[in-house]
Amino acid sequence: MKAIDTNILIRFLTGDDELQSKKVYSIFKIAESEKKELFVPLPVVLEVLWVLESVYEISRTKILESISDLLLMPILKFDQQPAVQQFVHSAQGNKYDLSDLLIAHSAKINGCESVITFDKKASGFKLFELLD
């Protein structure tokens, strides 16, 4: 199995570079035809969130839809997939930082009761604990 980097998913989601986007599409089609999976490390998901939000200024709703769509692709195997799924579900209908929510759900899946933080806004979410 091969892993993919953030820029691969960004090209796939945005199509901002036509040549690179075609290469990504080709790699995905080959993986599909050969029934292979491509691994998506959790830090890649975190970077995708940041890039789509900060660089491309894509709305929260569209980012969550994009991650949901990626989760449905049989060729993509996500690191901590249950955490990513829970993150997408919990991120809908609130204003917490997407990266914070992904961190919290990753910690929860790994058996943590909470994430200790100095971030007052994040601490409002049930999986965070404010250190004052």
Image (cartoon, grey):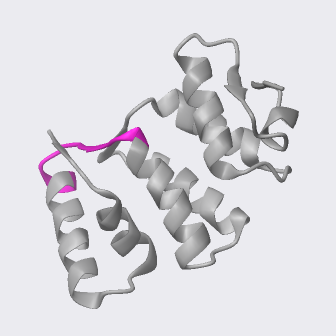
Side of 89 where 52 appears, left or right: left
Side of 91 where 3 appears, left or right: left
User: How many labels were placed on the picture?
Assistant: 0
Q: Quadrant of the N terminus?
A: top left
Q: Is residue 83 magenta?
A: no
Q: Position of residue 111 (x, y in %)?
A: 57, 10
Q: Position of residue 37 (x, y in %)?
A: 23, 43
Magenta segment range? 32-42
122 or 71: nearer the eye?
122
Q: Quadrant of the C terminus?
A: top right
10 or 35: nearer the eye?
10
Q: Is residue 39 magenta?
A: yes
Could one spot residue 72 in this view of the protein?
A: no
Look at the picture and state if 64 lies above or below 82: below
Look at the picture and state if 82 lies above or below 31: above
Q: Position of residue 125 (x, y in %)?
A: 82, 34
Q: Position of residue 106 (x, y in %)?
A: 55, 28
User: Residue at left 61%, top 63%?
Assistant: 63
Residue farthest to the front, as pictured: 132
User: Residue at left 61%, top 68%?
Assistant: 53
